[in-house]
Image (tube, rainbow, N blue to C red):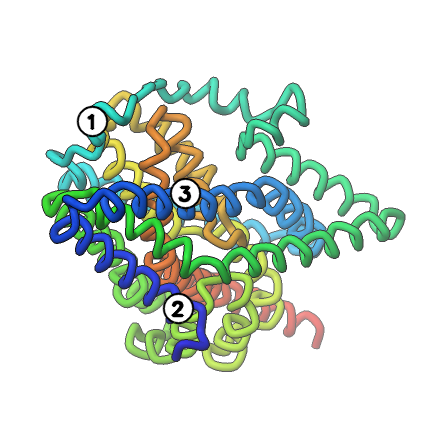
Amino acid sequence: MLKTLSARIFIGLFVGLVCGSIVQYLLQDISFFSSTLVDVASGLGTMFVNMIMMLVVPLVFVSIVCGVCELQDLGSFGRLGTKTFGFYIINTLVSIFAAVGVALVLDPGRGVDMTGGEGVKLTATELPNLMSLIVDIVPRNPVAAFTSGNMLQVIFMALLLGAVLKSMGPHVAGAVSGFQTANKVMMKLISVVMHLAPLGVGALMFKLGATLDAEVFYSVLEYLLLIIGMLTLWVFVVYPYAVQLFTPVSASTFRQKTQEQILFSLSTASSNATIPVTMRTLVEKLQVNHAVAGFGVPLGATMNMGGVSIYITIAIFFIANAFGMPITLEQLPTLMFSIFLLSVGAGGVPGGGMVMIGVLIHQMGLPVEAFALVAALDRLIDMILTSCNVVGDTAVLTIVDQTERPHRVLEQADEE
């Protein structure tokens, strides 16, 4: 069991939390434990978060360029491409609206003070209005977009470059090959950093355990259970019954056919790593046409982010409430649009949800402590979140395939 990264991260999380709690409740009067050791843990946790953030911009840029280049010509797919793209967008939007509704009703983080007294200074900045947000997607200075970590601008440049490379075909095969090699390098770097995750997560949880009181821990637990509960509901109820509603496949059959996919995605916490299993589930178990699966699965790993949408929405409401900056109704339209764009941009990126929450934390002027909290709990959430994303891919493509069956019958009849 200890050979798997997930098991080691769970142990790091548990040990860090327990040791931090021991320091707070039993060793608080000993300065070595309550001060020096906590400072060391804080430094290690911050270094781990910084290592991830260091790789984020190049990883997002390279992976999106490669994703666009590897897609088949959307024009040749016509109706299929439009349907798949449209259903993915609808799925993400429904997830965002549902998560916002739950967050408004349950108000996670309300009444909790995580500002840490005078040690944290909030520098609130209003989210830009919707038009400003759209205009700002196009960067004036590409170098500045990279150095500032403006993720929406980086995504725009990656999509634009990927589309141009795709349109030039074999003339730029060398450039495409270079990006594919760079993508492999970035994935390897992420893998190396993630092997340090047990230590990094343990350090972050140690600091939380040593500094946050019981009331805050109870609130954090509620936040964690709320996200996991919504993701689990989507995996085992919403998606299966959506498939049952639009296809002959029953909800119980869909749950049974996706068991292997769920377990694999839980262990890897990677939509990209689960692509082969998703393909096999669709083609062999659910009898989805290979062309539908071959086109839709890579696209889904990039942009079908229902799970990420739920995660980002609940997390930002919790953090905003806990740090004394609750989301107002006037901010909701812009925030939801931001979450939608960031959810799409998180596809295929390890820890993408955590990164996109970091972008919103920066936009809202919240302190770095908020990101540390998200990072500490991210791996646990990311496993279930990935399962939600990949099962969402399977559900959407099963429905798309059902709508395509009459057209395939007509095409076969015309050929005969």
Q: Which mark is residue 11?
A: none
Question: Front-most of 65 and 353?
Answer: 353
Q: Residues within 10 Å of mark 2 (few under 14, many from 20)?
A: some
Q: Amino acid at mark 1?
A: Gly
- Decide: marks 2, 3 in contact (CB < 8 A)? no
Residue 77 x %, y %: 65, 56
Q: Amino acid at mark 2?
A: Arg
Q: Which one is in front in this view, the residue at disc 3 or the one at disc 1?
A: 3
Cα–Cα span, label 1 and label 2: 34 Å
Task: Report the quarter where the C terminus lies.
Answer: bottom right
Q: Secondary structure at mark 3?
A: helix
Q: Amino acid at mark 3?
A: Gly
Q: Along the horizontal axis of the image, is 224 left or right of 62?
A: left
* Residue farthest to the right, as pictured: 171
Cα–Cα span, label 2 and label 3: 20 Å
Q: Which residue carries the number 1 mark?
A: 324
